[in-house]
Image: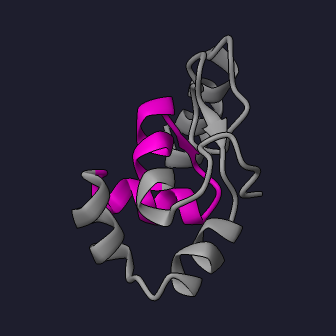
Amino acid sequence: MPIQSIHQATAAASPVSGSSYGYVPEGVTPIGSSLAALRKSRGLTCAQLSERSGVDLIIIMLAERGSDLMADERAAIATVLEVEDNVSWS
């Protein structure tokens, strides 16, 4: 089976999907690309934000491309960026 067909079959079988990355569990909030702008305005690289927040670098990079963050990841990043964790970053 081609990879595209496998992805389509998996996506169709998933009961909850609000993200291009597949299953989205309850409590996950989409962030959007403005996270990158906020991070840059604070003079931080993705690696620095990852180190200071404790959130994996890959998770931050994916979030800046529109993936979702878990509530605890979002709160940790918000603390480093000195914003409320319920602020709209999208």
Q: Kindly indicate the quadrant of the structure image that contains residue 52.
A: bottom left
Q: Is residue 79 above or below residue 74?
A: below
Range of magenta residues: 55-77
Identify the main secondary structure in magenta: helix
**48 or 1: which is nearer to us?**
48
27 up-or-down from 29: above or below: above
User: Quick check: is 79 in the magenta stretch?
Assistant: no
- Is residue 37 rendered to the left or right of residue 55? right
Percent across and percent down for residue 84 are 62, 48
Instruction: Tell me: 26 left or right of 77.
Output: right
Q: Which residue is located at x 44 percent, y 66 percent?
A: 61
Q: Quadrant of residue 19?
A: top right
Q: In the rendered image of this protein, does residue 48 appear above or below residue 16? A: below
Q: Nearer the viewer, residue 2 or 32?
A: 32
**Residue at screen point 76% across, 51% down:** 88
Seen from this angle, which residue lies furthest top?
15
